[in-house]
């Protein structure tokens, strides 16, 4: 029910959170020693995929 731009934004944020959770699941102890994040390039790839409707 969202327009294309809103759906892409929502998809991009969902994709970023999904990748963060995958990273945390792979190394749960990492959250105790440092901030877990995605690089700018990784975020950009998620955004491109969301705009293409592939997230």
Image (cartoon, helix red, strand yellow):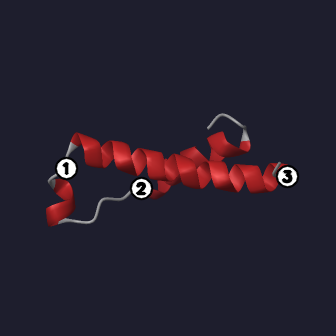
Residue corresponding to mark 1:
28
Badge 2 or badge 1: first in the primary sequence: 1
Does residue 44 appear in the picture of this structure? no
Question: Where residue 3 sits in the image (x, y, percent)?
Answer: 85, 52
Whole-Å distance between the Cαs marked 2 and 3?
Answer: 28 Å
Horizontal side of 37 relative to 31 (left or right) equals right
**What mark, if any, has residue 39 been given in the picture?**
2
Question: Where residue 25 sits in the image (x, y, percent)?
Answer: 27, 43
Badge 2 or badge 3: first in the primary sequence: 3
SS at mark 2?
Answer: loop
Residue corresponding to mark 3:
3
Residue closest to the eye, 54 or 41: 54
Which residue corresponds to the image point at 64% horizontal and 48% vertical from the top-left? 11
Horizontal side of 22 relative to 29 (left or right) equals right
Say few, some or many: other residues with alpha carbon within 10 Å of mark 1 (under 14 / 14 to 19 / 20 or more). Answer: few
Question: Where residue 36 sits in the image (x, y, percent)?
Answer: 30, 59
Badge 1 or badge 3: first in the primary sequence: 3
SS at mark 1?
Answer: loop
Horizontal side of 32 relative to 11 (left or right) equals left
Quarter location, residue 19: top left
């Amino acid at each position: 029910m969202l327009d294309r731009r809103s759906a892409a934004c929502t998809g991009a944020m969902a994709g970023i959170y999904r990748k963060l959770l995958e990273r945390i699941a792979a190394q749960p102890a990492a959250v105790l020693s440092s901030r877990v994040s995605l690089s700018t390039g990784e975020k950009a790839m998620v955004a491109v995929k969301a705009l293409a409707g592939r997230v």
